[in-house]
Image: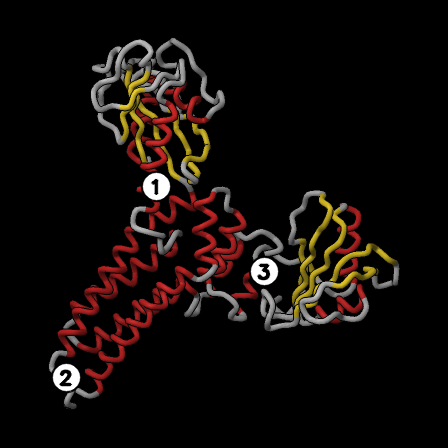
Amino acid sequence: METDTIFAVASGAVRAALCVLRVSGSESSQIAITLCGKLPAPRRAVLRNIRAPDGEVLDRGMLLWMPGPASYTGEDSAELHVHGGRAVVQAVAAALVAAGARPAEPGEFSRRAFLHGRMDLLEAEGVADLVAAETEAQRRQALRQMQGGQSQVLADWADRLRRMLAWQEALIDFPDEDLPADVETALTADIGALAAELEAARQDARRGARVRDGLVIAVTGAPNVGKSSLVNALAERDVAIVASTPGTTRDALEVALELGGIPVTLIDTAGLRETDDPVEAEGVRRARARAEHADLVLHVLDASRPEIGAAVGTFRAANKIDLAEPPDGMLGVSVLTGAGVPALRAALEEAIRRLTEAAGPAVLSRSRHEASLREASAALHAANEAVLPELRGEELRSALRALGRITGAVDVEAILDTVFGAFCIGK
């Protein structure tokens, strides 16, 4: 399949003024000649009639010719910019098939770019994340990854590992040579330092995942303190049912919104209280479970009765300040009048910023990254504990292979389908 010439709509499937069809593969030049006539100069757009193989004019649009290896995929590539009507796009796609191209699979363009050395796996995942980005923070993180920011960090770690491995091989192969006396001490110190860095990056990987996948904020509190009303106020729309009857919210209600440039899921949970109602009791159990696994917990109290359900959460906010003053040191809001809601939103955004940016841009953002870092870190710890120098060398090689799997610097055929299968067609 990697020798086929492929094509896909690269500009989205909706009706629009223009549509871009991307072609890549060894037959791109001949297909472009068949449909558009003489090839233009590389990377120069020209206006051409676009014809079916039988000569029928299908549209008049732009042709771009990009010979490899200086193309996105590293192969000969072409782009057809046609009018975006469905009939036009379908006719041109049929002409491409008739000329010898086939529709691309999801992620096939980026996969070919990886196989031809135009990007590594981290950068390819950055492309997918950039296409999927919905917030400013997601865009910044994905762009940095696509431009190789994370890859450079991995490359620096790999260079240090290779130097350690070179010293270790010297200790194995030339034990009787006049090597510096402190080589062994320096080597173990370097291994320990790198292991600590990898472990710190692994622990920090959750920040990158929070930017990419979003955070979860559980809104908890006793019945009738105004949790659902506060969720509606933060979401700026009516998404949760509000009633004066205790126990109205029986199950967790999820609301998606954006806070501080980060996608957030607010979870409106059942009121926390002891109850004999089995349905409400299950809702309370689920509320406590969601709070335990949430990134933040917003615990809501009644300003007029702050002693009821006064559990400590990540955030505590006193609702109904139109009836009473909030307790000292606690944010006060009134979902009835809107007072204090902007201040609460700002406080939540600051907390989210600390969770996602406090230590600078995250190095990694996916579970496979974290798993490889965990393996590399474990191998380094094992290297420092190895009794025989040969065993230490093997552990260093294992750590290097684990890091290589993140960027694709080693054989990773088993994970390519997983990485690129989630891409959109056309990328």
Disc 3 to disc 1, C-alpha distance = 35 Å
Does residue 418 show up? no
361 or 404, which is in the foreground? 361
Q: Position of residue 9 (x, y in %)?
A: 67, 53
Q: Where is residue 369 in the image (x, y as percent from the top left)?
A: 37, 56
233 or 284, which is in the foreground? 233
**Residue beneath the point at 49% across and 61% down:** 416
Q: Position of residue 413 (x, y in %)?
A: 47, 65
Q: Which residue has dot 1 on it?
A: 353
Foreground disc of the pair 3, 2: 2
Q: Which residue has dot 3 on it?
A: 108
Q: Where is residue 286 in the image (x, y as percent from the top left)?
A: 34, 27
Give the amino acid at mark 3. Answer: Glu
Foreground disc of the pair 2, 1: 1
Q: Quadrant of the N terminus?
A: bottom right
52 or 362, which is in the foreground? 362
Q: Which residue has dot 2 on it?
A: 180
Classify 10 Å Cα crowding around label 1: few (below 14), some (14-19), many (20 and above): some
Foreground disc of the pair 3, 1: 1
Classify 10 Å Cα crowding around label 2: few (below 14), some (14-19), many (20 and above): few
In the picture shown, does residue 149 fall above or below 304?
A: below
